Image (spheres, rainbow, N blue to C red):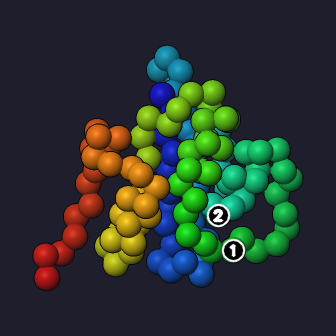
Amino acid sequence: MAVLGIDAAWTLREPSGVALISKSGSRWRLLAAAPSYESFIAITGGANPSGDRPRGSEPDLSGLLSAAARVAGVEVDLIAVDMHKEIARTFEAVLLDEGVTSQDAEFLHCPLDSG
């Protein structure tokens, strides 16, 4: 089992942290962690982390999933996202743009205020 975790920034100008963990038997282990979407894709592709401040950007979901699968050796089973409700709709739009549908996800939970 592979889980991709995203700690989403409040704006696209700020970087969002990304981590990949996997479970083998009863043991969980950290496979990769990075301070931004771009740096996660870069370091999982073998690039050395730069000393520059990470930049914010829109998530490249297909790039993140490809990078995670390459490192984990399996497809990602679950994406866990910690984000403020104000940006949840933007992230949902990105998922839809990337072709993620309810058929692709067993469980999607995004509590938004109704007002």
Could you tell me the amino acid type at mark 1?
A: Arg
**Residue at 48%, 28% in the rendered image:** 1
Q: Is residue 12 above or below residue 103?
A: below
- Disc 1, disc 2: CB below 8 Å? yes
Residue 67 at least partly seen: yes
Residue 82 at least partly seen: no
Q: Is residue 32 above or below residue 49?
A: above
**Residue at 56%, 28% in the rendered image:** 74
Tag 1 secondary structure: loop
For this orientation, the residue located farthest to the left is 114
Quarter of the image where one finds residue 15: bottom right
Residue 51 on image: x %, y %:
85, 67
- Read off the residue under disc 1: 55
The alpha-carbon separation of the residues under discs 1 and 2 comes to: 7 Å
47 or 92, which is in the foreground?
Answer: 92
Residue 68 on image: x %, y %:
61, 41
Tag 2 secondary structure: loop
Q: Is residue 61 above or below residue 78?
A: below
Q: Is residue 14 above or below residue 36?
A: below
**Residue at 29%, 40% in the rendered image:** 103
